[in-house]
C-alpha cells in the first residue's frame, strides 16, 4: 500500500537505535572483521531498505539476504557497490542474473556446483557453504569439498571467494557441546581449503558473535537479530554489549461498548462474557500477522495490561477493558506505555516461537514508520 496509511495500525522503528546497535557491534568485533548485516525477509519484518541503509551507514560492509530477488532490489536501490551475499538457494539457471548484478551467491552442495560447472556462462563469485551440523544447506564431507575444489580449479568462471557454515544452537549456553562440535568440524574443513587467507571465512550469526568466548569471527560475522535488539531474558545477562529494542507495534480502539453477561465475542464459540464487560475493538488481525498464538501477552491500554478475548479475526480483534475508554485510545501490542512494557521476546516466548518469527510475520499491510 502506498502512504498515506489510513488505518491507524502501525509499527514504529527507531533507526537511531539501529545505528547505535550496529556501532556497538562493530566496536565489539573490531576493525579487521567485516560485519554483514543480514536483512533477509524484509529485514526480519523491520524494513529491508531502511535497515540495510542504516547498517551500512553505521559500519556494516556486507549485506546478507536469502534470495536473489532480495539482492537485486538492494543492488538497484541502495547498495550499488556494496558486496551482497545470497545465503539461500539460487537456481543455477539464474547464475547470469547474479553475475550481471555482481552479487555473490552460495554454493549449496556438490551437486549444485556440478550443475553450475556445466551451465555457467559469465563469471560469478560464490561462497561455499559447509554443513557442520545444521543439516540444511552445504557440503557435508571433506570428499565433497575436495571435488568442489577440483571443479573450481578447472573452471575459472566459478570464483571461490569465501567459505562458511551456520550454527544450529549458538544461543544455547546451557549446553555448548553441539556448538563446539560444529566449530571444530568447520576448522577441519578449513584445513583443506586452498588460499584461505584470500577468502572470506565466516560462521557466526548473532548468537555465535556475542555469547561465546571462542569469538569465532574469522574475517566476517553475519548478524541479523542483533541489529534490532537484545535477546531473550536468560541470554540477555550474557550480552557483552548494549543492544536496544528498536520496534513497537500499536493500534487504537475503534469502538468501545459494554456487553451483557453471556455474550459471545467474535467468531466461533471461544469466549463468553461472564459479567457485564467493557469490550474494545481494535483494527488489527491475523491478516496483519497477529495470529491466534500471539494472544497470551495481551495489549497495553493507558499503561494497563488488557486481555485479547475471542478469536482474532483477519482484520480486527477484541480486548476486555477494565472500564470505558474513548475511541482512539492507543493500544500497544509491543512497546511501552507508562511503566508497562510488552517486549517482542515476551510475545515470542509466550507463543513458543522465536522473536524473529513474530516480527517477520507482521504483514506489509502494517506500515513501518521510521524515525
Ligand atoms: N547466517 C545465516 C546463514 C542465516 O540463515 C541467518 C539467519 O537465520 C543469519 C546468518 C543471521 O542470524 P541471526 O539473526 O541469528 O544473527
Image (cartoon, grey):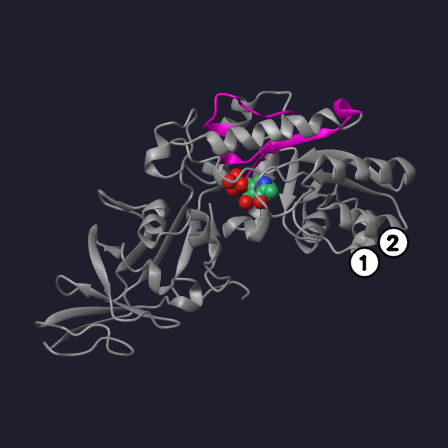
Q: Which mark is residue 119?
A: 2
* Residue 81 pos. (x, y %): 75, 39
Q: Which quadrant of the figure shows ligand 1?
A: top right
Secondary structure under the numbered disc 1 in the rendered image:
helix
Depth check, front residue: 180 or 101: 180
Q: Which mark is residue 93?
A: 1
Which residue is painted at 43% across and 26% down in the image? 241
Whether the magenta-drawn stretch holds residue 215 is answered as yes
Report if the CB atoms under discs 1 and 2 are less than 8 Å apart.
yes
Depth check, front residue: 77 or 313: 313
* Residue 18 pos. (x, y %): 49, 38
Quarter holding the N terminus is bottom right
Compared across the picture, whether 332 is left or right of 63 comes to left
Q: Is mark 2 within 8 Å of ligand 1?
A: no
Q: Which residues are magenta?
A: 195-223
Nearer-N-terminus badge (1/2): 1
Whether the magenta-drawn stretch holds residue 265 is answered as no
Amino acid at each position: 500500500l502506498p502512504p498515506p496509511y489510513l488505518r491507524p495500525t502501525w509499527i514504529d522503528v527507531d533507526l537511531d537505535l539501529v545505528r547505535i546497535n550496529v556501532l556497538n557491534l562493530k566496536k565489539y568485533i573490531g576493525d579487521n572483521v567485516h560485519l554483514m548485516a543480514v536483512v533477509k525477509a524484509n529485514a526480519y519484518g523491520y524494513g529491508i531498505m531502511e535497515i540495510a541503509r542504516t547498517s551500512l551507514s553505521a559500519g556494516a560492509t556486507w549485506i546478507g539476504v536469502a534470495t536473489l530477488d532480495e539482492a537485486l532490489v538492494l543492488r538497484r536501490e541502495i547498495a550499488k557497490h556494496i558486496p551482497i551475499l545470497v545465503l539461500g538457494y539460487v537456481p543455477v539457471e539464474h547464475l547470469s542474473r547474479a553475475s550481471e548484478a555482481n552479487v555473490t551467491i552460495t554454493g549449496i552442495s556438490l551437486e549444485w556446483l556440478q550443475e553450475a560447472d556445466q551451465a555457467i556462462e559469465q563469471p560469478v563469485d560464490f561462497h561455499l557453504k559447509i554443513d557442520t551440523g545444521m543439516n540444511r544447506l552445504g557440503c557435508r564431507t571433506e570428499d565433497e569439498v575436495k571435488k568442489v575444489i577440483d571443479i573450481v580449479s578447472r573452471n575459472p568462471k566459478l570464483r571461490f571467494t569465501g567459505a562458511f557454515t551456520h550454527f544450529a544452537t549458538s544461543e544455547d549456553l546451557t549446553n555448548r557441546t553441539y556448538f563446539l562440535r560444529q566449530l571444530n568440524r568447520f576448522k577441519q574443513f578449513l584445513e583443506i581449503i586452498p588460499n584461505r587467507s584470500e577468502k572470506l571465512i565466516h560462521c557466526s550469526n548473532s548468537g555465535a558473535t556475542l555469547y561465546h568466548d571462542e569469538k569465532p569471527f574469522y574475517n566476517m560475522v553475519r548478524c541479523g537479530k542483533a541489529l534490532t535488539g537484545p535477546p531473550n531474558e536468560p541470554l540477555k545477562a550474557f550480552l557483552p554489549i548494549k543492544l536496544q529494542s528498536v520496534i513497537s507495534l500499536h493500534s487504537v480502539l475503534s469502538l468501545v461498548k459494554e456487553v451483557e453477561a453471556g455474550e459471545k465475542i467474535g467468531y466461533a464459540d471461544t469466549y463468553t462474557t461472564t459479567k457485564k464487560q467493557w469490550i474494545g475493538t481494535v483494527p488489527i488481525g491475523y491478516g496483519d500477522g497477529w495470529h491466534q498464538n500471539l494472544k497470551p501477552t495481551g495489549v497495553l491500554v493507558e499503561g494497563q495490561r488488557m486481555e485479547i478475548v475471542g478469536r482474532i479475526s483477519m482484520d480486527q480483534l477484541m480486548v476486555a477493558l477494565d472500564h470505558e475508554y474513548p475511541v482512539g485510545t492507543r493500544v500497544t501490542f509491543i512497546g511501552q506505555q507508562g511503566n508497562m512494557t510488552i517486549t517482542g521476546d515476551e510475545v515470542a516466548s509466550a507463543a513458543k516461537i522465536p522473536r524473529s518469527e513474530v516480527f517477520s510475520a507482521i504483514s506489509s499491510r502494517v506500515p513501518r514508520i521510521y524515525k
